[in-house]
Amino acid sequence: MPRSKIDIPCHVDYLSILDETGTVDKELEPDISDDFLLDIYKAMVLGRRFDERMLNLQRQGRIGTFPPITGQEAAQLGTVAHLRQSDWFVPSFREMVAEIWRGRAMETFLLYYSGYNEGVDIAEDQNNLPLSVPVGSQTLHAVGLAWAVRYRKKDDVAMTWFGDGATSEGDFHEAMNFAGVFRLPVIFVCQNNQWAISVPLSKQTRSKTLAQKALAYGFPGIQVDGNDVLAVYTAAKEAVERARAGDGPTMIECVTYRMMMHTTADDPKRYRSDEEVEGWRKKDPITRFEKYLIDKNLLEPKKIESVDQEVKEQIQQAVDKAEKLMKELGDPLDMFNHAYAQLPPHLEVQKAYLAKELAETMEKE
Amino acid sequence: MPRSKIDIPCHVDYLSILDETGTVDKELEPDISDDFLLDIYKAMVLGRRFDERMLNLQRQGRIGTFPPITGQEAAQLGTVAHLRQSDWFVPSFREMVAEIWRGRAMETFLLYYSGYNEGVDIAEDQNNLPLSVPVGSQTLHAVGLAWAVRYRKKDDVAMTWFGDGATSEGDFHEAMNFAGVFRLPVIFVCQNNQWAISVPLSKQTRSKTLAQKALAYGFPGIQVDGNDVLAVYTAAKEAVERARAGDGPTMIECVTYRMMMHTTADDPKRYRSDEEVEGWRKKDPITRFEKYLIDKNLLEPKKIESVDQEVKEQIQQAVDKAEKLMKELGDPLDMFNHAYAQLPPHLEVQKAYLAKELAETMEKE
Amino acid sequence: MPKLTMVQALNMALKQEMEKDDAVIVLGEDVGLDGGVFRVTDQLYQQFGENRVVDTPLAETAIVGMSIGMAIYGLKPVCEIQFSGFSYQNFHQIENHASRMRWRSQGRFGVPMVLRTPYGGGVRALEHHSESREAFWSHMPGLKMVIPSGPRNARALLVSAIRDPDPVIFYEAKALYRAFREEVPEEEETMPIGKSQIAREGNDLTMISYGAMTRPTMEAASELAEKDGVEAEVVDLLTLSPLDDDLFTESVKKTGKAMIIHEAPMSYGPGAEILARLVEKSFYYLEVPVERVTGFDIIIPLFNRENHYIPSVKRILRTARKMMDGMK
Amino acid sequence: MPKLTMVQALNMALKQEMEKDDAVIVLGEDVGLDGGVFRVTDQLYQQFGENRVVDTPLAETAIVGMSIGMAIYGLKPVCEIQFSGFSYQNFHQIENHASRMRWRSQGRFGVPMVLRTPYGGGVRALEHHSESREAFWSHMPGLKMVIPSGPRNARALLVSAIRDPDPVIFYEAKALYRAFREEVPEEEETMPIGKSQIAREGNDLTMISYGAMTRPTMEAASELAEKDGVEAEVVDLLTLSPLDDDLFTESVKKTGKAMIIHEAPMSYGPGAEILARLVEKSFYYLEVPVERVTGFDIIIPLFNRENHYIPSVKRILRTARKMMDGMK
Ligand SMILES: Cc1ncc(C[n+]2csc(CCOP(=O)(O)OP(=O)(O)O)c2C)c(N)n1
Ligand SMILES: Cc1ncc(C[n+]2csc(CCOP(=O)(O)OP(=O)(O)O)c2C)c(N)n1
Ligand SMILES: [Mg+2]
Ligand SMILES: [Mg+2]
């Protein structure tokens, strides 16, 4: 067999169920209860409105820099929707609406992006990791959590999110490889939103898809229309089931788009055209899902309005709560909290130093 | 196109030309001049004998720890044979015979493995990087060199070697990705010798081949019988031609075997069976190449003997030279050489400190 | 002379060096069309094209590893790591290779690269965007570690760094990027790497600082002069490694008192080395213990509290006054 | 009590902790069947199986990143990085995550992991196998940095490290692995992290050291006593961070003279911090400048010359005598 083709498993599917016009592929339509469909819908709307409100607050200087999620609601909710309470949630930094779905209180975002450490507040019964800024690095934590889950003979899974840019990092590679070798219950969710700040996907990799990268690690990858919540949901369902059954990891590439700036500190006009953005606006994940729910008689114009109203009230409550909290919180001495399980002597000294400085300042004022 | 198969390029060839018995596949037989075939043969024998001699010296305590290459001569020579003087040679730490082919003097190995910094001695006209110990890390230097080559509009290539274990490192991933994105003239040569110290390939990755990892980066990978110097040569020829022509990188997986211990500090009996090793002994790259050359009437028993003799003499000369050099070299003060292009003041002080200490010791003795 | 911010001055240095020498290549994340997230590479892509100003994939190790290869070839790569908080991704390429390739190759291959990266707090940024870990690099043999304190010296030092035959880690204080303007000559200007400078003369107390902290230190010195009649001498280190210990020890021989100011955590921070040199070279001149005013040994808090973490003018003054009072 | 080498003592610590607590997991390159390249994990795979003793692929970042995940879950991973020279590959996972997950999560997730790694020279090894870069880790808030100096304290400290709720970097001096044996009790023994000890009492001079350098320091102290009639007090730090500065400053208050000995390069090395603490806490007791006997600020040479790089008994003595002579 001198020069022969090696038969390598190199199958990558593309999945789309709800097209851009909101028309569903009946054969592939997932079986989701009406209530759950509406829950997802509400969460999508909440994510969108909250993003808009945050942007507004940021522009008014009431909060600091944050990364908007608009356009990525389906990718986030279609995946996170499968997690049980005991599953492990391992986000990157742009999973705001997935975090809310997992129970993170909305006011904590406002605290966090106003520079309060208290903006991270995870209850003991929540298996949610705090957001992770170093691109790609958190994927390895998901691998370790999944390893521990299996070691403890549970059927929980770990799901981790990251961007297209993250696939270039060594950490991503090592996480994928370990997950493959140990056949761990991890789901790698790539939100391919086409851009890593100013770098387009074409400059990020020469690979045709990101999903196919999974093949290098001996496990399945699938590409889905990331603005189609039904497709995302279906692919994630398969992946989670496989993971729970002990059949190892999956990578899901959600093809979506970052509709806004990278963060509020970024100006995308420097590097991409308005036409490109407008083209993607037509593929909006919420509009088409709305159409689907209307067609299913689960939604009508009045209901849409009331969801919007409800969501806006929730947001207003969160903003009010955050502003109140900001007045109460922020004792500088708290910066020494949680440095270690127990504050070591030299930090007691440093804390006392700061306390003294603060006291003196108070005196003077 | 709801659930559709994505057409991804996922072609990986396996190439074998000279089988284990030394029988050649006439159709695929590469066109190599008789002289060059004999050059390669001599180099293979030299590599083998030098390895044996080094092991011997190490066992006698005359040199320190080193990594033997026995079994990997074909993988190294079949690839390096394509490099021109101006091409860039970027080895890992187990490319002894490839280094010799590139012009590294044999005595420098003995110096190096005896702990002399002078064991690295690269002439200005040699584009050979010194050996690199941190697994996988050197692949990125090849990428940078290849980038520079292209920037300077040369048609040189950079060739880099690494092991199966190295494919797990983040650096390998990042190097492959950059090479793909920038479409650089780099050849990635993986010597898959089945083991990374005590870790077998099956625990290194769940990927069926290592060659297929190239597909994740959008460029070709090929698997070859790494103990078949004709197959390695042929695959490398294609890769180098592609690179010179501006058609980008290639990954070549040479399936071979580490016949000896990882380094002389290692005891492989702890983790692998003698049978496995014996099984691979039958696939020896030199025996089958010898058979091929005999069949081609390029070699006869007497010639084999004379090559062996010639090689042994060269080795003896190198050993003699090294032992002589060791007596001359080793001034401790030389440790300050090449720390910077120009020694900064604090190092002048430290060097003077050592000089004084040495002088005092001399006085006392 | 144009009055430039530090961002503009750094940009000028890159632009002029690139015009002079086609071996100078800029690479990193978003350095191209975007001009860098802080705009230090603004318009370079437009002027020099994508072969000179290279937008890379998102991978710090590769950015540095590739720079090493380019530098070995003979180019002069100036790579940008977007935030120093992400320069640990490439730590091994610097420790294992950049800092020792010249040594390892016994002089055959130098690595004339510059790694530029913004460091430090004070710009209300997210986690990992406000750290000061210059001590890591300063402790690595084979490297040079440079930290300018204003537009003019930033420009001159960057030019010198680019021309330096050895790898230079170049820390740019984010807090200074747009904090003030200085006249920066259009004509070529360099400054020697490895030399500190006296930013303010005085005979009563030596204040040693660098980078972003030079400003509050200078302010504190002014206030001391005005309100306390104390003339502090301020030493701006500019290079942390190799450390110019002549200048500050000479100063302390004159004043007898020294304090060191930096943002980095105190323990095992740069101040420790400066203090050690003071003891080694001017022990018998020290009238009181050397004092360190630094960041605390904790992660710098999110921005709401960071001004209580970073040494302030007030904190510097408090220590300075304690030292001077101790003398009465 | 059995007399054990440091390798055996470390092995005992791992074995006993694994027997007591099934949350303890050993992972790394070649730690399984092979028992680790230095045999510290010998026979653990055979006793505990591949679910407790995990041979990983060759990827340090993943070893550490995965350990972080395991630790967040509540396991107690003890990962081995084969040589400290390759721990920079995972530097960012420690700096960006392990050291700050407790802080970032506001106490919700601790990272009770141990990173064991051999460091230092003296075993005729290849490049990258002989460095001492403990200062890097000591400068990172949120970590603990432990360096034992012999079999017995290595065993006790490793047990404490495993039980510690925070991440511990555990440096094992290769030069000590098989250098000598000590009686190590079969019964449980722990030692507090963050505490130094007096390895030898004396009133004339304080010698501060840790890890592999404790031995030549002790030898030098003996010779000083025998030949010079000088009684040196030797402080063995054991933990570099948090640094126990009470013990050595108390000693210096008694002796008035201090020297610090370490293998790491001098500049920005651990000695600088120790010296700084001495100045801050015992300045007025110092009779002569504190001295540092350390590695040079260059890459440690290949092994033929390394004994001229690493502080020797002779070099320590030379400095000690200079300090004592200065007093006459
Ligand atoms: C290791 C690291 N390098 C650089 C950055 C700066 N940075 C933050 S987000 C980002 C782009 C990320 O792109 P992608 O992974 O596609 O995620 P997206 O922002 O599109 O959600 C960069 C470069 C970082 N946070 N971490
Ligand atoms: C980054 C790094 N980690 C660990 C080591 C220690 N080490 C040296 S060689 C080796 C195994 C390498 O395996 P492979 O890549 O297959 O190459 P081979 O030794 O088989 O030639 C290991 C773990 C190292 N040199 N560098
Ligand atoms: Mg993206
Ligand atoms: Mg191998």
Image (cartoon, coloured by chain):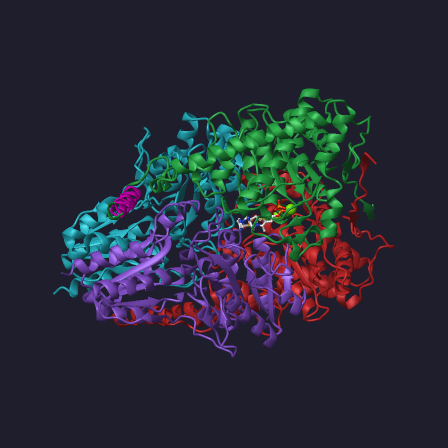
Chain colours: A green, B red, C purple, D cyan
Does residue A245 sit above or below B140 in this rendering? above
For the residue pair A101 and C278, the one nearer the viewer reads as: A101
For the residue pair C180 and C122, the one nearer the viewer reads as: C180
List the single residue furthest toward the right: B27
- Which stretch is magenta? A346-362
Does residue B134 sit above or below D152 in this rendering? below
Residue A30 rendering spot, x and y as whole percentages: 75, 25
Does residue C8 sit above or below A282 in this rendering? below
Res. A48 image quadrant: top right
Question: Is residue D30 something that shows in the picture?
Answer: no
Residue drawn at x 71%, y 71% is: B153
List the single residue furthest toward the bottom: C187
Residue drawn at x 66%, y 55% is: A269
Residue drawn at x 58%, y 44% is: A67
Relative placement, left or right, of A12 versus C100 is right
Relative placement, left or right, of A71 versus D64 is right
Residue D316 rendering spot, x and y as whole percentages: 26, 59
Residue C17 rendering spot, x and y as whole percentages: 56, 73
